[in-house]
Image (cartoon, coloured by chain):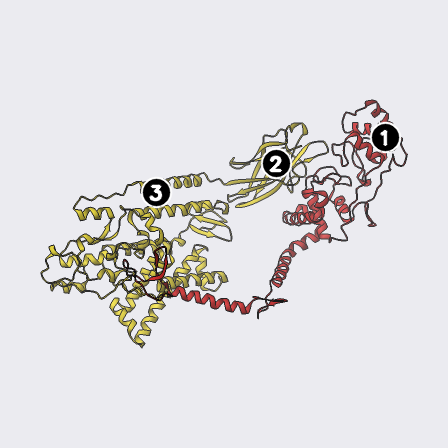
Chain colours: A red, B yellow
Amino acid sequence: MPTKIEKDSLTGRETTGHEWDGIKELNNPLPRWWLYVFYATIAWSLVWFVLYPSWPWIDGYFEGVLGRQERQVFDSRMAQAQAAQAQYLDAVAAASPAEILEEPQLLTFALAGGEAAFADNCAPCHGLGGAGQAQYPVLADDDWIWGGSLDAIRQTIAYGIRNEHPQSRFSEMPAYGAMNILAREEIVDVANHVLTLSGGEPPDAAAADRGAAIYEAQCSVCHGADGGGMTDLGAPALNDQIWLYGGTLPEIVAQISQPQQGAMPAWAPRLDDTMIDMLTVYVHTRGGGE
Amino acid sequence: MPDSNLERTVQSAQVETVDVLSRSEQKSQSLFAGRVKVHPQKIKGAVRRWKWATLVVLLAVYYLAPWLRWDRGPGAPDQAILVDLPGRRLYFFFIEIWPQEIYFLTALLVLGALGLFLATALFGRIWCGFTCPQTVWTDLFMWVERLVEGDRNQRMKLDRAPISLEKVTRRGVKHGIWLLIALLTGGAWIMYFQDAPSFVVNFFTGQSGAGVYFFVGLFTATTYLLAGWAREQVCTYMCPWPRFQAALLDEDSLVVTYEGWRGEPRGKLKKNPDWSARGDCIDCRKCVAVCPTGIDIRDGIQLECIGCGLCIDACNSVMEKIGRPRNLITWDSENNQKARAEGRPTRLRLIRPRTLAYVAVLLVIAGITGIGLAGRSNLDVNVTHDRNPLFVTLSDGAIRNGYEVRILNKTREDRDYALAVEGLQDARFMAIGVTEAFVDDLVLTAPADGVAAYQVYVTVPRDRITQPQTDVRFVIEDLATGETDGQNEVFRGP
């Protein structure tokens, strides 16, 4: 507070007594109601301080007499959200994937749930949205190694491929080179033939012709005479434009000699049935469902 | 119209002087200022009549507008002005606004601000003095106060009087009526958000939601406090408008002005005064007594002046009595006052660069808004390309892209829409939940007054794709009306 009350000569008003570079500030008093509101907020903050968590101790903090904790609020809100989901979750649980597809409300719910579960569990290998990546199949296309129907997709998700689960899908392509079933030249011949199945031009037409007989004898049992594949055995179609392990001649030769055999974990032990149903519907609607 | 009280004094050639100090004269010099209570005196006159007329019209609009009906067909509310928060619609007669069209509301606010700028540049704080809700309700509350407790002197006497049955009764009646008006005000506000007739029934039968009672209570409390207790403090302390009004005024703005050049030197009225030796102001302080914010207009234009012009009525009543020219306090511009003081001719400059600029911007924005409203479509389509995967190669080599297509149907009936993609050859479509397989022509449905979202796949033969990114345009056509809307997107490939 200034020691001497000074009045501004021009306005007749008091100054605050402070001076900066010859400029003095007029005293414009706060309205009293404003001051009282300010005091009220201070009083309110003290009440708040006592009621709610407010002050850190060395190990812990003052919890407030109400004992309210944000973690409990979070838990109760989560419980509320789950309760709100329950009606849809129950309906999805009661319906088969095919029935979910028919019912717009259930479909919307299942796609949202399936998308989240897919991002958590499947996307690391298959990519977000089923985009796939090298050596992991694209799930958004129309080419299915183990079948693209709802039942086949569900089976694959639930029990996986080439894992320890007793119901796992399983097949094994012989390593024609490593196991010396075919000679090196024969493998190159058959690889040339495989390239013709999808309408491509093989680098060596004569080799392709020679390979046709070998294909007929060795490969057609699983991959089909026309290269159409066989989903029951997880034998991919060879007559299309989609190559999981590469579609060039060296890559095909490598795959015949020493096949890469992809594996996928079983999800039934980790996810509940409803979630697997929602994942099934989600994968089926990525664009290639049969 | 001279006050009847004053008519008696005119015969003795005397004018009653009011014992009143203006706000600046009694300003507290402590660090914190107590409120200087204002007891505005009753005044009659032309300005007061205008204020009453404005008040009646504005209150009538406020209370009656929610009751206007407007037929929008079945399934839609029939209230002309309605903010339907749960339904996320804003209805104003023939206009219906969806949340994503809220820019129309922005335009309305911009127009309101510009209108305010223009009015202020032309006539000073005419908004504050006549049409601001704070002024209108404060005026109404003061009228009630005057009815119950009497005019200025009686109210001051009642303030000073010790507590008595009469004092308690008068105060109780006053606050009772205030609260009733406040309740009606708060209740009417809710009618803009709920169907008015059913709201009234529900409210009084206790069937409205807790939120409704809360907001009615909130608006009742704020009306009561702001118009009954806070009054001019809202204008001087809370409202930002007085702080920057100075930037909107210029030397040609018409503002409430004391004609100092002919009023000064002021002095008490004596018998047979020599008017050539003194000013016309007889320092009766009538202008201070009637001021709702308690200021002395003779100090010049100031922040607290809300431009209501009641001091003009007060001064004119006195000028008539003492036989001097009217309008010692008047609406006039600074330039004209200088001209009058020097005896030069005056001129009214309503058209000047500042006002022309405001009018021009006002017209441009009103025009844009009008065109937007007139061309408002009943159909809106939003297309978003899938982020993952950007494209998929199919077994026959064809390229497929996925999109989310959202169709907004603003009509009152379910509609079918044909989807086409311009810029692609031999495109085939599939929509999840709509088609089992790929088709050449895709028809999508959107519900009445609603939004439908579809996952749509577009497949194009490999040899039709020549570049990694093809510009395409999704076009949706309403099969019932032929109305179309489109959005540009891209089709990606290897």
State the SS at label 3.
Answer: helix
State the SS at label 1.
Answer: helix
- The chain containing the residue under callout 3 comes to B
Q: Point out the image quarter for the C terminus of chain B.
A: top right
State how far apart marks 3 and 1 are (Cα).
85 Å
State how far apart marks 2 and 1 are (Cα).
47 Å
Identify whether B469 is placed above or below A71: above
Q: Badge 1 is on which residue?
A: A187
Q: Badge 3 is on which residue?
A: B358
Residue B479 lies, in percent from the top left, at 55, 36
Label 1 environment density (alpha carbons within 10 Å; few <14, some 14–19, many ≥20): many
User: Is there CB contact under 8 Å for labels 2 and 1?
Assistant: no
Tell me which corner region of the image, top left, top right, bottom left or bottom right, holds residue B315: bottom left
User: Which amino acid type corresponds to the residue marked 3 in the rendered image?
Assistant: Tyr
Q: Badge 2 is on which residue?
A: B442
B186 to the left or right of A90: left
Tell me which corner region of the image, top left, top right, bottom left or bottom right, holds residue B317: bottom left
- The chain containing the residue under callout 1 comes to A
Label 2 environment density (alpha carbons within 10 Å; few <14, some 14–19, many ≥20): some
